[in-house]
Structures are given as structure tokens and as C-alpha cells.
């Protein structure tokens, strides 16, 4: 169940000082990917759309360094890597199967960033994945309509859980 493509949509909130001023990463299983394009991203009131990997129905990757930010390159990620328990937890029996710690957004800056919405869509298409799958990850109970600040003074991670799945 190889992950072949990842699509990330992030809406930056509409508040004073909302823009991100540092790198943003997607954590997926045992890897991190840089969410950066050739144009400025994460501007106040905008939704940014990132495609990681070119093997899938969404088309070509649109991030900087597309080969190094491809889920099929260097170290493959399997769907169970995202749905299992966190490797840092010593007692997996007490953690539910759909642990929220295997898909996350990380913001690395001492300047705050205002996030209104995040959706991560993980795809596996044949070949090389068997079977095909399509899983959407979101904040479990949603982000409040006002949004959430990320940064050095607020916390740098936003953990996501599976929300919609078409896994046979």
C-alpha cells in the first residue's frame, strides 16, 4: 500500500499578522516534506495547494525540489505507517489504532502564523500500490472558525487524523 501522491491544502486565516514567515513541513509516517513553491505561500486569507509526487490523478508535483519531496523516492511510505500508533509511544495498547501523531503540519519559525484550515489527502494508485486508496486527514474535531496560531509562543505542530477513507 505505497503512498504515491499527497495533496495538501492549507488556508491561512484572515487576521493581522497571519502570514507565515518560516518553513512549513508535512509529517507523514517516518518522513517530513517541505511545503514550498516558487511563489510566496501562506499569505493572509489565501489557500495554498501543494502536490507531492507525480504518480497519481492530480498530476505533476508543484513543490520545490519535487524529486526530493516525492513520497515514492528515497524512502517509501506505506498507508499503515500513517494509520498505526506513534513510534515514540511505549505502550501502544492504550493508544487507539488511528493515532493522531502520524500526520502533522509543523511550522518552524519564531514569528506566528494563523491557520484556518488544513486538509491532507493521501493517495495510492496502482501501480505500485496494491490496492488503490484515498484517505483524507484533518484536525479531528476541526479548527474553530477563528483559526489557530502556530509558532514559537503557541506550539509548532498541528496533528491530523483520518476523516474520510476509501480503502478496500
Image: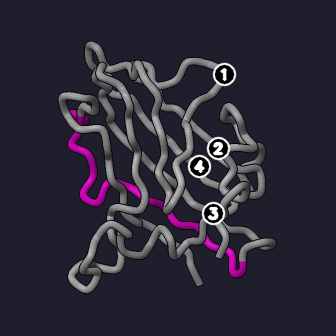
Q: CA distance from mark 4 to mark 3?
A: 8 Å
Crowding around mark 4 (Cα neighbors within 10 Å: few <14, some 14 to 19, many 20+) is: some
Q: Is residue 2 above or below residue 28?
A: below
Residue 36 on image: x %, y %: 58, 30
According to the picture, the residue beneath numbered tag 1 turns out to be 38
Q: Are marks 2 and 1 in contact (CB under 8 Å)?
A: no
Q: Are marks 2 and 4 in contact (CB under 8 Å)?
A: yes
Residue, disc 2 = 51
Q: Earlier in the sequence, mark 3 or mark 1?
A: 1
Q: Residue at x 34, y 61 (%)?
A: 101
Q: Disc 2 and disc 4: Cα gap in Å?
A: 5 Å
Q: Counting other residues with Cα less than 10 Å from the Cα at mark 3, is it few (<14), some (14-19), or many (20 or more)?
A: many
At 66% from the left and 56% from the top, the residue drawn is 71
Q: Earlier in the sequence, mark 2 or mark 1?
A: 1
Q: Which residue is mark 4?
A: 7
- As drawn, is 43 to the left or to the right of 76? left
Of the numbered discs 4 and 3, the one sitting upstream in the chain is: 4
- Image depth: mark 4 or mark 1 in front: 1
Identify the residue at horizontal 23%, vertical 38% (top origin).
155
Find the magenta span and give its range: 130-148
39 or 77, which is in the foreground? 77
Q: Are marks 4 and 1 in contact (CB under 8 Å)?
A: no
Amino acid at each position: 500500500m505505497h503512498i504515491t501522491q499527497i495533496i495538501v491544502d492549507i488556508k491561512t486565516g484572515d487576521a493581522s499578522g497571519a502570514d507565515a514567515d518560516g518553513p512549513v513541513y508535512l509529517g507523514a509516517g517516518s518522513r517530513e516534506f517541505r511545503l514550498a513553491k516558487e511563489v510566496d505561500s501562506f499569505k493572509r486569507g489565501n489557500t495554498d495547494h501543494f502536490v507531492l509526487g507525480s504518480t497519481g490523478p492530480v498530476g505533476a508535483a508543484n513543490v520545490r525540489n519535487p524529486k526530493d519531496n516525492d513520497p515514492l523516492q528515497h524512502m517509501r511510505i506505506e498507508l499503515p505507517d500513517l494509520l498505526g500508533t506513534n513510534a515514540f509511544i511505549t505502550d501502544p495498547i492504550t493508544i487507539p489504532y488511528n493515532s493522531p501523531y502520524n500526520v502533522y503540519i509543523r511550522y518552524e519559525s519564531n514569528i506566528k502564523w494563523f491557520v484556518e484550515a488544513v486538509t491532507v489527502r493521501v493517495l495510492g494508485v496502482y501501480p505500485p500500490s496494491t490496492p488503490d486508496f484515498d484517505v483524507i486527514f484533518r484536525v479531528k474535531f476541526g479548527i474553530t472558525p477563528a483559526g489557530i496560531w502556530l509558532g514559537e509562543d503557541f506550539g509548532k505542530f498541528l496533528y491530523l487524523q483520518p476523516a474520510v477513507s476509501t480503502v478496500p
